[in-house]
Every structure is written in C-alpha cells, then in structure tokens.
Amino acid sequence: MMIMGDWTHGVLKSKGFTNYQWTTAPGTDGIFLVLSDSFGLPKGCAQRDNAVISSRFAAPKRVRTL
C-alpha cells in the first residue's frame, strides 16, 4: 500500500493506467484531511501583499488551527 495525495488518481488516469485502486487512509472515515505543500515567499518579492493575501485564501487561520 502507498499513501499518496488525491492527485495520484488523476495522474495515473491521464497516463492510461487502469490496474490500480484507491481509498481513504485507514482510520479516517468521516474526517476531512488537508495536506499542502509549502508555499515560499522570496525575500524582496515584488508582489508580497498579493502573495500574503493568496496564502490566506489557500489556508485561512480557521482551517490551519483545526
């Protein structure tokens, strides 16, 4: 068993793979999981304010603190 993100199904399907199955992670029935890559903000970023607003939209404090 490999535990991967929900993106895996789309990638495998787009490559023509058909001999695989997917399901939720064991013990997570009824639980909504969120996993995100890191979003870096380079020093001296020309669009810093927009990047900060975007990061808040992607993961509001309410979601980050559940």
Image (spheres, rainbow, N blue to C red):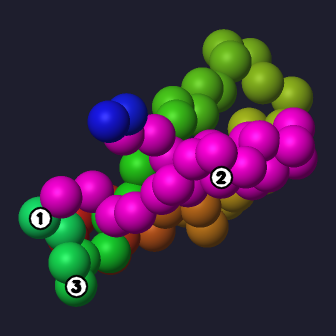
> What residue is shown at x 60% (from left), y 26% (from top)?
40
Q: Residue 30: give its label.
A: 3
Amino acid type, mark 2: His
Density class for disc 2 (Cα within 10 Å; few <14, some 14-19, many ≥20) is some
- List the residue tagged with mark 2: 9
The stretch drawn in magenta includes residue 17: yes
Amino acid type, mark 1: Gly
- How far from the left and from the top, in percent, is residue 61? 36, 67
**Quick check: 62 above or below 54?**
below
> What residue is shown at x 58% (from left), y 34% (from top)?
39
Q: Quadrant of the N terminus?
A: top left
Residue 29 located left or right of residue 23: left
Question: Residue 28: in sight, yes or no?
Answer: yes
- How far from the left and from the top, in percent, is residue 60? 45, 68
The secondary element bearing badge 2 is classed as helix
- List the residue tagged with mark 1: 27
The secondary element bearing badge 1 is classed as loop
Q: Main secondary structure of the magenta part?
A: loop
Mark whose residue sits in front, 3 or 2: 2
